[in-house]
Image (tube, rainbow, N blue to C red):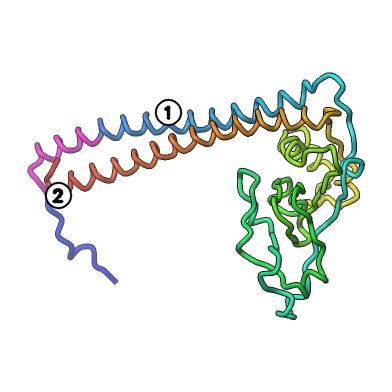
Amino acid sequence: MILVRNIEVPIPPLPEQRRIVGILDAAFEGIATAKANAEKNLQNARDLFDSYLNTVFTQKGEGWVEKRLEQIGTTQTGSTPKTSDRANYGDFIPFVKPADFNTDGSLDYENDGLSDKGLAEARKITAGSVLMVCIGATIGKCGYCDRDITTNQQTNALTPFDGVSHKFVYYQMLTESFQRRVLLSSGQATLPIINKSKWSALTVALPPKLEDQKRIVAKFEALRAETQHLELIYRQKIATLEELKKSLLHQAFNGEL
């Protein structure tokens, strides 16, 4: 136990204390304003992407058709091989869980995996599929895979048929409308869950031509890249302001201010 009363604290004369406090008050007020502006700009960058995304899928385009997920691809739910049999696990194929979903839709493949024996007891999801967490606090979280994977039973997957862009479906699943329908279909229980049959019956709107889907996806990805660049700038600015605050305090209590 440390006795605070035994710690020596250097105290300058009162006029010097007031001078330092005045400098810190002014500096911290400026830092707080700059940080608030950076945080607002960070949120604005995110809102810009979300707004564009929702607008595209709300207004839709000429000739777009509404179809259930089960009509545009194969749907399935993941499964977990027996954990008591360690021979089921290895590095033959990634085993993805909700925590492996990144905010940009990509997946972390390196955390867990199954052996070829484990794959025989699981369900393989082929590259180019769309995934969604369908149970628990992160229900509605979306991703897509660029390689063959397996998942646990918390995740549903759609492997689109030819003529359907998996990324076009992925971006549509991010919209407020689709996310709302997921929650409405999950019930009002303490643990929200949407089963495969209800999830497969959810609809998406599609341009009939694959090249039109890909063209829209390219616009989404260009805007997302710009948004992520802006987010990085603003996060760095916020971190720099926090460091400046610490530096000022260090200088103040070391007689360097």
What type is the residue that disc 2 sits on?
Answer: Asn
User: In the visual, does 137 lie left or right of 24?
Assistant: right
Residue 132 percent across, percent down from the top left: 75, 49
| N-terminal-most mark, 1 or 2 | 1
User: In the visual, does 102 lie left or right of 24?
Assistant: right
- As rendered, which of 172 and 182 lies closer to the eye? 172
Q: Are marks 1 and 2 in contact (CB under 8 Å)?
A: no
Q: Main secondary structure of the magenta part?
A: helix
Is residue 190 shown to the viewer in this render?
no
The residue drawn where x is 78% and y is 75% is 117
Q: Is residue 206 magenta?
A: no
**Disc 2 target residue:** 254
Q: Which residue is farthest left?
A: 13
* Residue 8 placement: quadrant: bottom left
SS class, disc 2: loop
- As rendered, which of 212 and 150 lies closer to the eye? 212
Q: Is residue 12 magenta?
A: yes
Residue 157 percent across, percent down from the top left: 80, 51
Q: Which mark is residue 37?
A: 1
User: In the visual, does 151 lie left or right of 230?
Assistant: right
- As rendered, which of 45 and 227 lies closer to the eye? 227
Quadrant of the drawing holding the N terminus: bottom left
Is residue 170 shown to the viewer in this render?
yes
The residue drawn where x is 68% and y is 67% is 113
The residue drawn where x is 65% and y is 28% is 219
Q: Residues within 10 Å of mark 1 (few under 14, many from 20)?
A: some
* Residue 105 placement: quadrant: top right
What type is the residue that disc 1 sits on?
Answer: Asn
